[in-house]
Image: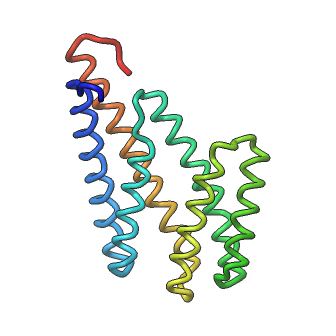
Amino acid sequence: MKKLTLWDFVYAVDMAIACAISYAIITHILVRVVDKPNELLGGMWAVVATVFVFRETRASSLSAGLDRLLATSISFILCLAYFLIFPFTVIGLVVVIGVGTLIVMAFDRHDDIVTTGITTTVVMVVAAMNPAQSWQQPILRFADTVVGIAVGVVCKWLCSYLFFRAIGQPMR
């Protein structure tokens, strides 16, 4: 077991604060336009995106944010197109996951297959809970993700800058 450093504690507090900010931003925006379950789902999805981009270095955090944005964008486009034409079905779910996988492979981004598949699954299954408004789910989850990524990257960069500047070490 590793002895925790001051940076480890600062990192953990920074990530927790970033998650709280992401959750607060999304839930305060969504409370005006969606029902309570969608508001809570939006907050959770923004927090997931924030956690996803928190990495050890600023460069890897930015890279993770771009990876998440690409995977989410592919999922967003496919799910929205699907729901504008068809209602949710399990066959539709697996077809969209398969098509998303092929698109990610075509971009030679094999590491993003998992994120694209998870995002697609969540969006489609949540949309199935309210078929009349299924087309809204890709849009809402894309917005949640963008907020979570932005807050996570900004908080990670700002905290790293301030911490390593204060202790006189090169930034991570």
For the residue pair 154 and 171, the one nearer the viewer reads as 171
Residue 144 on image: x %, y %? 43, 60
**Residue 125 versus residue 23 in the image, above or below:** below
Taking the spot 32% from the left edge, 79% from the top edge, the residue there is 36
Is residue 8 toward the left or the right of residue 85 in the image?
left
Q: In this view, does 161 lie above or below 133?
A: above
Furthest-bottom residue in this view: 132
Residue at left 65%, top 78%? 83
- Is residue 129 or residue 77 the one in the foreground? 129
Question: Which part of the image, by quadrant, shows the C terminus?
Answer: top left
Q: Position of residue 37 (x, y in %)?
A: 36, 78
| Residue 24 percent across, percent down from the top left | 27, 59
Residue in the picture at 33% in, 54% down: 22
Q: In this view, does 120 lie above or below 146?
A: below
Residue drawn at x 39%, y 57% is: 46
Could you tell me which quadrant the N terminus lies in? top left
Q: In the image, 107: left or right of 50?
A: right
Q: Position of residue 150 (x, y in %)?
A: 41, 45
Most extreme residue toward the front, as rendered? 1
Q: Which colour scheme is used?
A: rainbow
Quarter-wise, where is residue 100 in the image?
bottom right
